[in-house]
Each structure stands twice: as structure tokens, then as C-alpha cells.
Amino acid sequence: MPSKDSSEERTLLIVEDDRPFRERLARAMEARGFTVSIAETVAQGNARAKDSPPAFAVIDLKLEDGNGLDVVETLHNVRPDARVVVLTGFGNIATAVAAVKYGAIDYLPKPADADDILAALVASPGNKPKPPENPMSADRVRWEHIQRVYELCGHNVSETARRLNMHRRTLQRILAKRSPR
């Protein structure tokens, strides 16, 4: 089936397991002219992406049944021109790079509002975002380093703790928290 140009078609898939956020975002995007379908798991997101590939998608990185990047990859395979934005409260540089490799056009930290998401979805290709005005905090730099080592260790907590010379339980507590600002 030939796909329409994504700038003309306003179909949007939202894959998010936080129900109140998902419903608020769906209403906000419908008010902005999108025809919205929703999913709350990787399995549902993949099914909707295959059944009727949307022109746009907003996908949470961390879902109850797995990694939202699986949905990004599926959608990119069935509709390469789809514009996908990945959202996460557990962001780091490694997952942002992975999201782009799988076909996402942007990566936004939660909480993101509908206007930020809309701007990312419809941004012109090649538009460069402004550099941040404030440098990362020391806590954020530490968080990024821990997340990078965790990714390099294949999400193995014990190996990551060993490489960081950190107690495993301490590392688990750090990984369970949201990223610092």
C-alpha cells in the first residue's frame, strides 16, 4: 500500500502506559488536528503500527511489557516516512542515540507538553535545536555516565555495579529513579 506524504496525513499513534498522560495527550493532539489511535504496550503498539501505519507517532521508551524502541523499529520498517518522537522519564544519551538509529526524529524528556511534542513532530528536517542555556548539573552528568555504562553492560546490573565500583543495591536505587535535571 503506498503511503501518503506524512505532512498531509495527520494520523498519530500514541504508545504510552501512563493512562492519564496518554488520554490528556490524545485529547490535546486531537484538538490540534490529528486523528489519534492509542496503545499502552509494545504488543499493542506493534499491532497498530502494522495494521494502519500512522504518519506520526509518540512512543514512550519504557513500557510495561518492554522497550518502546521495538515499536519505533516496527513502525519505521512498515512506514519509513513516519515521524516518530520518543518520550521518556528515564532518558540518557545512549537511549537517545538508539532511538534515532531506530528511526525516531526526536527524543523528549518527560514531562513534555503537547506543544513541545507537536513542535518536534512537525519540525522541518534539518532544523537544529538551540543549545541548552544551562550546562548539565553534576548529578545529571553522573546519571548519564551510569546509564551509559549500564547500556554498555547490556542492562546487567551486577556487571554495571562492578565496573562502576558501586554496590549493586545502590545502583538499583539509582536506576529506579527518574533522571535529575
Image: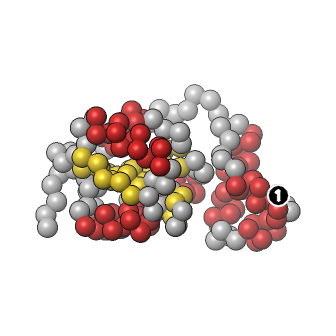
Residue 50, percent from left and from top:
28, 68
Q: Quadrant of residue 118?
A: top left
The residue drawn where x is 77% and y is 55% is: 173
Q: Which residue is mark 1?
A: 170
Residue 175 falls left or right of residue 90: right
Quarter occupied by the N terminus: bottom left
Q: Quadrant of residue 102?
A: bottom left
Which amino acid type corresponds to the residue marked 1 in the rendered image?
Thr
Quarter occupied by the C terminus: top right
The residue drawn where x is 66% and y is 47% is: 178
Circle 1: element type: helix
**Image mark count:** 1
Residue 169 falls left or right of residue 113: right
Residue 126 falls left or right of residue 17: left
The residue drawn where x is 29% and y is 48% is: 36
Residue 30, percent from left and from top:
28, 39
**Badge 1, how many Cα within 10 Å: few under 14, some, many 20+?**
few
- Does residue 127 show up? no
Q: What colour scheme does the image use?
A: secondary structure
Residue 120, percent from left and from top:
38, 40
In the image, is residue 51 above or below residue 40?
Answer: below
- Does residue 116 show up? yes
Foreground: 63 or 75? 63
The residue drawn where x is 73% and y is 68% is: 157
In the image, is residue 7 above or below residue 31?
Answer: below
Residue 84, percent from left and from top:
36, 52
